[in-house]
Structure formats: C-alpha cells, structure tokens
C-alpha cells in the first residue's frame, strides 16, 4: 500500500501567516467612553425611534404614511397595492429593514384592530391585536392604501404647513411632522421603549378628545375637573369594561402617569351552561388567558370549569368557558377577574417629544402643546395662501395696465428683433416689472383680446378681499382658533364613533367567599334631604338621642334594615346609585353621616329624590309623574347581575317625578294599597295600585291616572289615604270617588290639604 502523505509536515501546503498586531490600549474614563460611544445611540433611539411626537406618530409611522401619500394611495383611490410594494418604497426613507417597516404597517391597519381609527385600509390577513399566535400574512399576499381619516393627517402638507428635511441619503425630502387637524396623539395608542425611558399612551374616544380640545380653545384656564367632564376615560379598540376610579383618572390627567383597570365583557348562555367572553383588556391576549385558566384548573385552584376554548371567527373574538352543573357564572367570573388577565391594568406613561425634548405631560399639557403646534400650521397655511394670492394679484395688476392698448402690446412683440428684448420693451412701454412683463409676454395670442383680459381683471376685487381677510385672520389669534374649532367639529362629525370601552363605576371582582364573611346585624338607617346617610347599630341607638343635622336639613327616610341589605338612591336625573349597607361605617346620632353625592360620585348638581332599602328586591315601585302618569316597575329591575354602582335610564325623565312608593307583596294583596293624587288646582282622586299595569321596562312613561287640564300638574301623592276616614270628619264628608275608580276627581279645599298633610306626617 502506498504510504499516506502527511500534509501536516508538507511545507508546500502551508501558507504564510501574517500576524496582526492588536490595537494599542488607551486609558480613558468610563464616563468619556459612554459619552463618546453610547450617548449618540441613546439619543438616536429616543429622538428617532421610540417616543412619539406631537402629531401622534413615531418616525417609522410617519415615513410609511408619507410614502403611501406620495405613491398616490389616497383614500379616494379605487385600488390598493401590494404591501410589499409599499414596504420597498418606504425603504427610501426608512432603511431599517423590511420586517420592521411591515410590522409598523400591520399595526396601523384596519385588519389588525389595534387602533380605534385605523390609518391604513387593508385587505388580507393582518393578524389581531388581541391574539399572540394569530400571525399576519407575508407582505406579498396583503394589500393596502390610506384610510379616509388620513385626509386629516395630510391636510395642508402641500401648503407649507410643516417643515421638510432631507432623508438619510439626501435624495428626497420628508416631513418633520404631519399637520394633523385633530389631536391624534391622544386618539392613536402608542407604546415605545427607549434607553432609560419609555412611553405608553392609551387611546381616547375621538369625539371626547375633540370636545375637550374645543373646550380648552374656548377657555384656556380649563381645570382638570372640567376636562374629566368631556374626556370621560380612555377608550380601547378591544372594548372591555373600564373600572372608573376618579382619583386614578385625575392623576393620569394631571401628571401623565398612572394606571387604569380594564376587564373583559361576557355573556352567560343558560341553555349551554357556558360563558362567552367577547371583549378582553387591550393588554391581554386570547392565548395568555386560555393558558392561565387551564393552569388554574390543572392546579386545582378552580374546579367549576369543564373546558375552555377559542371560538374566534370572522364575527370577532370569542372565548367560551364550559361550566359544571350548578356553577354560579358571576362567582366564577369574579374569581377569574382576580386570577387571570381577564382583568388587567393599563400603565399610562405620557412621554412625548416636544421640540426634540422628551417630556412627561398630562392631558391638558398635551392638548395645549398640540394647539400651539396646530396654530403654527394654520398660520403657515394662511401665509402660503396669502403669498399665492398676492402673486396672482400682482400679475393681474400688470395685465390691467395693458388693457387700454392691446394693439401696442402686439406691435411691440411683432417689431422686437430678438426674443430677449420683448420683456424689457414691455417693461419700459407699460411701466411693468419683470415678473408682470414675463406674464404678459407668455399670454397666448388667442387671449390677447379685451374679453379675456376683462374676465381676468374681474378677479382683482375678489383677490383684494381675500387678501384682506387672510391678513386680518393672521393678526387675530381668536380667528385662528375659530378655524381650528371648525376643523375639529368637522372631524368629529365625519369620523366620530361611540365608545367601545364601557365605563363602570364599581369594582365588583371581590371573591364570593369574602362577601359571605360579612357580618349581618340589624341597623337603623337615616337619610336627609341634603344627601347625608347614617347607619346606626342597635347598641348605639338611644331613644332620647337627637339626630345631628345641618341647620336647613331634614330627615326624609328613617328605616330599619340589615347590614347586608342594598340601598338604592334615585336621583332627579333619572339615575339610580346602588350601594351595600355594609360599605358604610357605623356611626352615631351625633354625626352627620356619609355625604352620598361625594361617596357615590354623583354628577354635578344631581340630587336624591327617593331611597329604597331592600334585601331581596321583591315588590314594585309606584312612580308618579307631574304630567299625571303613573308607572309600576318591579324592584327586581334594579337588581343588576354585575354589581354596578350606577344605573342610567332608571326611570323616565320626560316629566318630573312627584313621588315614589315601594309596594311590597303584602301591600299588593291588601285592599289598603290606595293612593290619593292631588293636582295643582286642588282636584283629587283615589286610585288602587291594581289598576296600574306592571311594566318591566324601567324607562316606561306609565299610564294616565288623573286628568289634568292644560297648565295643571300633579302636586302631591299620599299612600293609603283610607286612614284619614277615621281621623278627619271634614274629609269624610267630601265626595271622594269610589276606591279604584280613575279619571274622576273632586274639589279639595285648601284647609283639607293641610289636614291631609298633618295626618300623613
């Protein structure tokens, strides 16, 4: 066998190795190294990547949208183009890789559902904001164009509304900001992580943002409390229920930092014994929720669930939870809210770049900065229009000078030997400047007639008027603000939508086990006209104790109850505020008690007109209105499945409420369930509650129970007036209609009314 050649010792195969000397070590302070090598990177990330600017866009978003604008992919365009085409064109402004650009495009698209008002109209699979694993298709399969709201982002960009700068290789220009005609910074959610700082801006409802901005434009010293009246709370594209915490909202509005709690919305399908979740918090995903619930079941922490599955389809998000027989859906959801992302916090951090400097701003500060930016845009557009009109006026004034001698113009042009001498000859002959003479020289021969020139000259008067109006607007900040207000009104009208995120004024996610531990005992309850509520225990209640009240206040409800009962406060704005008795501290007769409008966050000027204490929501409410109608509504209609503290549409507000009475089951069976109705013209009638039909709709207007001539109204109602028969002889003699009769009335003398009031009291 031939001997194997040893290449290791074969010098012919060895190449000459050149040893490179290492770079010399240089002594340098670590602070200098960071400043020289790291700080430029830090500033680039902060300024050019992660933090949004006052137009509500990061640089990547702005470059992408402007590229689509220049490509002609406008909302009015009939056709979309491949996303890959858009991504490729955007590389001319944003050379950070195709995937990064496409990620930004996906988030702005309608299909992804990340924005309340998507900026890109999309076709194809773009994934979903609420799904971690639902991947979007490749850019070659999807199509896009700008959505209609982008008209408001680019309005004025061709009229010098904003500055332009060179792109990275100085081959084309791009806008520094987009001249958004509405505060997109608060409408589009934004999240960015820079070096040493972050930004997390939640989205708000467009209508509420526009209304708030208009309010600040009209009144510069608008307070946070006033802002909270128009800008209720954040609004998310995934919907859900926002648990309203006035203190937390006020802190976010003032400082730009804070946290808000959002939970899922669900329905219970009794026939299938399952819970269908159809909205989840913006920060949650279907997969994370499903995995967490499965783990809880596996660990034995939740035993009431048979199965959980994702049933999301073209109709939208849907997570179905199959329950075991006998499971209370409200109790299991209360547990899931506490243990899973079905209830989650959204951390707010309103970091915004203002003139190249990152600043943490509250809502009013953001809107104030946007207003200042928008006023500058409007002024620049006005200056642009002014210059254009002045240039046109200047040309027409030159045209006016040749009107009286058109033949001379033709003669000068015809007799001038060279083309270069035409303009100077016209200048000297008609006292024109070079611009005017150039304009006259460029007029077509067919237009050198009196009719054409006269038609053009007619524009001079209109131009002069427009120039005067624009100049006046430029000198008047109030008129500039009126332009912005008008634009905001148009945006609100065109693109405004109802809230997707429901606001609830309670946190009812406490575990059922906690609720069952509440001690129950009898209590004495007192409510005053001014809205003070006391809960006094039997041990603290003494017969000779005088209740402490404000000087002009009086007691309107005094009743015995249980610590676990509910109390319903009916207000003059057609709303009911609901609370648990155990939520109030035990007090004494010598204290004023809890002030209900503050404790339950009443609307401004809202007053209590009636209160009801109940443990089982049995019986009916008899509501008497000033227009003579009466509604009978089951008290159970106010027993909500979720423990909401505020019920809107509690009763009809078409006519003021005169009186409300709770008719218990024993009242309904008794012949004493009668009501004396007295009108403002001293007519009276007795009705039996059985004659009033029961209505399940809370906002029913009721039925007519007393005939009232024009200009008259129901003034008072007394329950069970039959007690008067044995007390007031004079009242007995009057011709009271038969019990249960309706639409008959008798005269009641004034002194009898006072006697009736005395007996009733």
Image: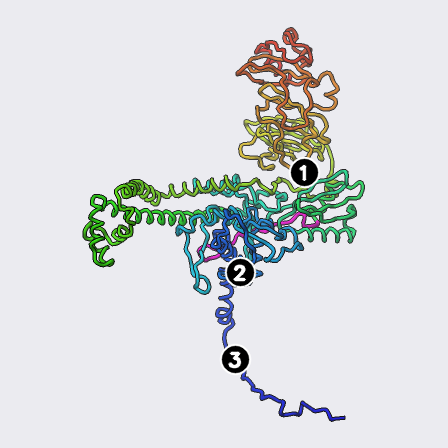
Which quadrant would residue 84 be assigned to in this image?
bottom right
Residue drawn at (58%, 54%) of the image:
106
Mark yes or no: residue 362 visible: no
The main secondary structure of the magenta stretch is strand
Q: Which residue is tagged 3?
A: 25
Could you say which disc has been placed on residue 643 in the image? 1
Q: Where is residue 499 in the image (x, y as percent from the top left)?
A: 58, 41
Q: How crowded is mark 3: few (under 14 residues within 10 Å), some or many (20 or more)?
A: few
Q: Can you tell which quarter of the image residue 9 is in?
A: bottom right
Sequence-first tag of 3 and 2: 3
Instruction: Provide the residue designation for mark 2.
Output: 88
194, above or below 552, in the image: below
Query: In front: mark 2 or mark 1?
Result: 2
Quadrant of the image containing the N terminus: bottom right
The percent coordinates of residue 182 (x first, y second) are: 48, 46
- Are the residues flagged by discs 3 and 2 in contact, CB closer than 8 Å? no
């Amino acid at each position: 066998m031939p001997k194997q050649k040893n290449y290791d010792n074969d010098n012919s195969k060895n190449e000459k190795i050149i040893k490179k000397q290492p770079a010399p070590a240089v002594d340098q302070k670590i602070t200098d190294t960071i400043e020289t090598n790291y700080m430029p990177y830090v500033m680039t990330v902060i300024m050019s990547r992660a933090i949004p600017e006052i137009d509500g866009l990061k640089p990547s978003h702005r470059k992408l949208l402007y590229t689509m604008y220049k490509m002609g992919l406008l909302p009015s365009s009939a056709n979309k183009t491949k996303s890959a085409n858009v991504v490729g064109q955007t590389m001319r402004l944003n050379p950070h890789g195709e995937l990064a650009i496409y990620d930004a495009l996906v988030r702005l698209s309608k299909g992804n559902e990340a924005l309340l008002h998507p900026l890109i109209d999309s076709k194809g699979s773009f994934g979903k904001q609420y799904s971690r694993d639902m991947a979007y298709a490749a850019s070659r399969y999807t199509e896009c164009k700008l959505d209609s709201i982008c008209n408001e982002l680019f309005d004025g960009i061709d009229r010098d509304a904003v500055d332009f700068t060179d792109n990275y290789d100085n081959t084309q220009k791009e806008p520094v900001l987009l001249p958004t005609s509405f505060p997109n910074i608060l409408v589009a959610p934004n999240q960015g992580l820079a070096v040493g700082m972050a930004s997390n801006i939640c989205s708000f409802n467009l209508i509420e943002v526009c209304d708030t901005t208009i309010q600040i434009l009209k009144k510069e010293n608008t307070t946070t409390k006033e802002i909270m009246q128009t800008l209720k709370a954040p609004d998310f594209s995934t919907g859900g229920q926002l648990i309203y915490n006035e203190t937390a909202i006020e802190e976010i509005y003032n400082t730009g930092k804070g946290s808000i709690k959002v939970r899922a919305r669900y329905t219970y399908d009794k026939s299938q014994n399952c819970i269908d979740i159809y909205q989840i918090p913006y920060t949650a995903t279907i997969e994370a929720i499903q995995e967490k619930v499965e783990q809880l079941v596996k660990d034995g922490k939740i035993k009431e669930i048979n199965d959980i599955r994702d049933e999301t389809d073209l109709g939208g998000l849907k997570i179905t939870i199959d329950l075991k027989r006998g499971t209370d859906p409200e109790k299991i959801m209360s547990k899931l809210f506490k243990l899973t992302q079905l209830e989650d916090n959204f951390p707010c951090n309103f970091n915004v770049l203002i003139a190249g400097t990152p600043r943490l701003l509250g809502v009013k500060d953001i809107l104030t900065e946007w207003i200042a930016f928008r006023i500058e845009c409007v002024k620049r557009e006005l200056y642009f229009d002014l210059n254009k009109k002045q240039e046109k006026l200047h040309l027409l004034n030159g045209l006016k000078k040749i009107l009286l001698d058109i033949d001379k113009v033709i003669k000068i042009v015809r007799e001038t030997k060279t083309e270069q001498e035409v303009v100077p000859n016209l200048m000297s002959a008609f006292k024109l400047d070079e611009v005017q003479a150039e304009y006259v020289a460029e007029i077509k021969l067919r237009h050198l007639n009196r009719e054409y020139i006269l038609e053009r000259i007619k524009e001079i008067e209109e131009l002069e008027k427009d120039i005067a109006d624009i100049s006046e607007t430029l000198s008047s900040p109030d008129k500039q603000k009126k332009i912005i207000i008008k634009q905001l009104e148009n945006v609100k009208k065109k693109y405004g939508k109802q809230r997707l995120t429901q606001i609830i004024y309670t946190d009812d996610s406490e575990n059922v086990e906690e609720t069952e531990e509440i001690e129950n005992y009898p209590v004495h309850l007192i409510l005053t006209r001014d809205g003070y509520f006391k809960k006094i225990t039997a041990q603290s209640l003494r017969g000779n104790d005088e209740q402490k009240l404000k000087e002009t206040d009086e007691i309107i409800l005094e009743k015995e109850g249980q610590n676990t009962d509910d109390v319903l406060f009916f207000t003059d704005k057609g709303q009911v505020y609901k609370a648990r008795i155990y939520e109030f501290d035990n007090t004494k007769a010598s204290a004023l008690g809890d002030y209900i409008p503050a404790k339950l966050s009443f609307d401004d000027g809202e007053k209590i007109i009636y209160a009801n204490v109940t443990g089982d929501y049995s019986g009916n409410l008899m509501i008497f209105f000033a227009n003579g109608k009466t509604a009978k509504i089951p008290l159970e209609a106010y027993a909500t499945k979720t423990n909401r503290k505020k019920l809107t549409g509690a009763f009809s507000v078409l006519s003021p409420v005169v009186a409300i009475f709770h008719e218990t089951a024993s009242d309904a069976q008794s012949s004493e369930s009668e009501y004396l109705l007295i009108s403002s013209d001293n007519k009276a009638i007795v009705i039996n509650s059985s004659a009033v039909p029961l209505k399940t709709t809370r906002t029913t207007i009721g039925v007519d129970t007393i005939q009232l001539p024009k200009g008259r109204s129901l003034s008072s109602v007394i329950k069970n007036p039959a007690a008067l028969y044995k007390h007031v002889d004079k009242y007995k003699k009057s011709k009271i209609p038969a019990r249960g009769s309706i639409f008959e009335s008798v005269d009641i003398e004034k002194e009898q009314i006072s006697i009736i009031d005395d007996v009733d009291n």
